[in-house]
Image (spheres, rainbow, N blue to C red):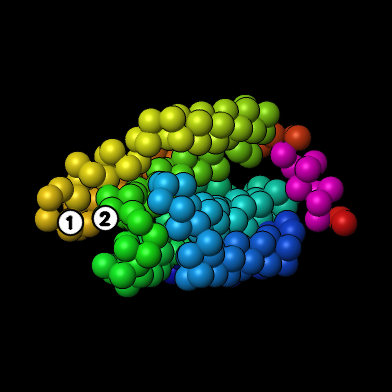
Amino acid sequence: MKDLVKYIKMMRYALQFKMILVLAVLFFIFGILFEVIGFSDSGSSYSLAALYLALTGMYFYQLVFSTTVSKMVQTSPMKKKLQVTGPILITFITSFIVFAIYVAIRLIKVTPEFLEANNVPYPRAYSTILFMAVWLFIFFIYMAFSYRSYILSIVFIALTVIGILGFSARTEIFIRISENLIGADNSPLLLIIVSLAILIVGAIIGYIISLLLYKKPISDMAVRYALRQASK
């Protein structure tokens, strides 16, 4: 608990603190807004609301990790925790919160009237929860090595976004999986549990990657980009 408080306090010293915090808040607000007004209720598993909310937690990874760019922190005994444990823990907490909020809104929103009005069955309506969990999983992996291998991380996230969106559009994979998890009784409980498990596994894998890459120097390109943005 003491370390968690330290991570939160250290975020104020992050590069681009105000800008990143504003972006996180904006993505959260727009995500909630899109979900509430039904901006992405198209009957597909793609949900702009879920994607925006998934991105919200990732900004907090930057807020913790970028504090270690300072030479003072580089020689501090807190360095490893601020580069490995701290970013993953803070991101997991914020991601879990936005995930829970999204699930709660969707559970309240998906009523017989909603399904009839949008002409979608239960599995399609709830498949966006799985969609969000998968993106959280991917973002955990991406952030874990984004500061170590900047170019590789950019290539990874670009190919992943194109691949998943293209594959899911052709195969409706999220909807098909949701159909199997929800079953004939139209209960989303198992789907939510599996989605939460995906989120947790993503955080664990992200932590393992961060731990394995800890001794690898921080990418000069990533630092230069952050410093350039911070100076604007």
* Magenta stretch secondary structure, dominant: helix
Residue 210 visible in the current orientation: no
CB within 8 Å, label 2 to label 1: yes
Q: Quadrant of the C terminus?
A: bottom right
For residue 156, what is the image quadrant? top right
Of the pair 32 and 169, the residue shown nearer to us: 169
Q: Which mark is residue 122?
A: 2
Residue 161 lies in quadrant: top right
Question: Residue 204: x and y, percent?
Answer: 36, 43
What is the tally of numbered marks visible in this picture? 2
**Is residue 211 positioned above or below 119 on the image?**
above
Q: Amino acid at mark 1?
A: Asn
Q: Is residue 26 left or right of residue 192?
A: right
Q: Residue at x 78, y 43 (%)?
A: 225
**In this rendering, does residue 9 appear at all?**
yes
Q: Which mark is residue 72?
A: none
| Residue that badge 1 annotates | 186
**Residue, far left:** 185
Tell me which amino acid carries mark 2: Tyr
Q: Nearer the viewer, residue 164 or 172?
A: 172
Instruction: Name the residue: 40% across, 43% down.
Output: 134
Q: Magenta residues, as a range?
A: 222-230
Q: Residue at x 33, y 54 (%)?
A: 120
Q: Is 107 displayed left or right of 162 in the figure?
A: left
Callout 1 secondary element:
loop
| Of callouts 2 and 1, the N-terminal one | 2
Q: Label 2 vs label 1: CA separation? A: 6 Å
Q: Badge 2: how crowded within 10 Å, few (<14), some, or many (20+)?
A: many
| On screen, residue 120 above or below 180 | below
